[in-house]
Amino acid sequence: MSGKRQRQNRSIRLEEIAKRCGVSVSTASRALNGTAGVRPELREAIISAARELNYAIPPAVAGRKVILAASSVAMVDYARNQFTYYVLDGLKERAAALGIEIVTRPVSTQQDETALLEEAGADETVVGCLFLSLDDAGILERTEAFEKPIVLVNGDDPLMRRSSVTPCNRSAGRLACTHLLGLGHRRILFLSHRGRRTIERRLEGWRDALTAAGVEDIDGMVVEVGDWLPEEAGNVIRKRLEEKGADFTAILAAGDALALGAAQTLIDAGYKVPEDISVCGMDDLPLAAFSAPPLTTMHIPMREIGSTALTLLLDDMAQAGLPRRVELACRLIERDSCAPLSRRQNVTGAADSI
């Protein structure tokens, strides 16, 4: 079979166009979508490369719309912890650069979902939809006949029916827990509000790190809270201390708000953070740097999640039928809320310095 025939029988990715032309993926995307900011001669070279590789060039998107379906979880987070705020900030910045209008639609019921899909399907100016923090498998089943691209933002589809963009939550959980293990901690409490798959991945990362380190005694070390609020975290930590004492030397929280609530409760109970008990969060919200003590946490690329989601959706316009899962790397931000295991802590992990 000739090279040309082989090329036609497989899908060409936007990254290949960018690599051939020696430009970034975003530049290649702008050139193919007809948006501003690309020199005419460079645009022509990119289009020529795309045609040579048999890449399906998407129609121009400037002046068109993308519907953002935001779940109740996302909207509550927008008002409280602002993870969603930064995701939307990155999305809107990318949309402005491309000349695309983002139309937000809150989704909380199946009727909302049906209305949204009908609106997006009937409106020729809508190029696709972004689903923000929508984990419900039902809505994905109901989009099977929807012909325009859909990208899941801060969520994923286990069956890979739709493309998605998330932080690499599992590796983030593992990196954070590995950091605590490196400081000598073995009794590491995992504090979380369970439910969403993205958060379950963080729990899996915690478990991966402990397993790799040979820590077997983890029964009862996962503590659940009812909501993503500091006071909820404080309540469960206070109850834990009353019932079992400090049977842990470190806390890894699935979100900064929970970590901050846990740290304050420990301090109120007479423990020193991090001298007696270390606390680590995830997200790296601005407040983390200004807490007392400043919070060690995993930096989640929130703005990049939003901008990457829109780029992926536009790329999917030319790659229909080839869903992809994009996971963005996270990194540890070391501050003052974690420290090596104190010699004043006994073998059970209970601090005996107070």
Image (cartoon, rainbow, N blue to C red):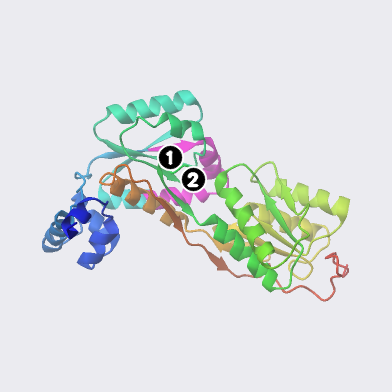
Reading the image, the residue beneath label 1 is: 131
Residue 18 % position (x, y): 25, 62
What main secondary structure does the magenta stretch of the protein show? Answer: helix
The residues tagged by marks 2 and 1 sit, at their Cα atoms, a distance apart of: 8 Å
Q: Amino acid at mark 1?
A: Phe
Mark earlier in primary sequence (2, 1)? 1
Residue 295, can we see it?
no
- The secondary structure type at the circle numbered 2 is loop
Report the front residue among 105 and 133.
133
Residue 71 is covered by the magenta coloring = yes
Report the front residue among 141 and 177.
141
Above or below: residue 93 compared with residue 71:
below
Residue at the location (51% across, 57% down)? 168
Q: Which mark is residue 155?
A: 2
Residue at the location (55% across, 44% down)? 77
- The secondary structure type at the circle numbered 1 is strand
Characterize the local packing of mark 2: few (<14), some (14-19) or many (20 or more) Cα atoms within 10 angstroms: many
Residue at the location (52% across, 50% down)? 83
Q: Are the residues tagged 2 and 1 within 8 Å (C-beta)?
A: yes
Residue 33 is covered by the magenta coloring = no
In the figure, is residue 132 to the left or right of 213?
Answer: left
The span shown in magenta is 68-91
Residue 320 occupies which quadrant of the picture? top left
Q: Amino acid at mark 2?
A: Gly
Residue at the location (62% across, 70% down)? 335
In the figure, is residue 317 to the left or right of 330?
Answer: left
| Quadrant of the snapshot with the C terminus | bottom right
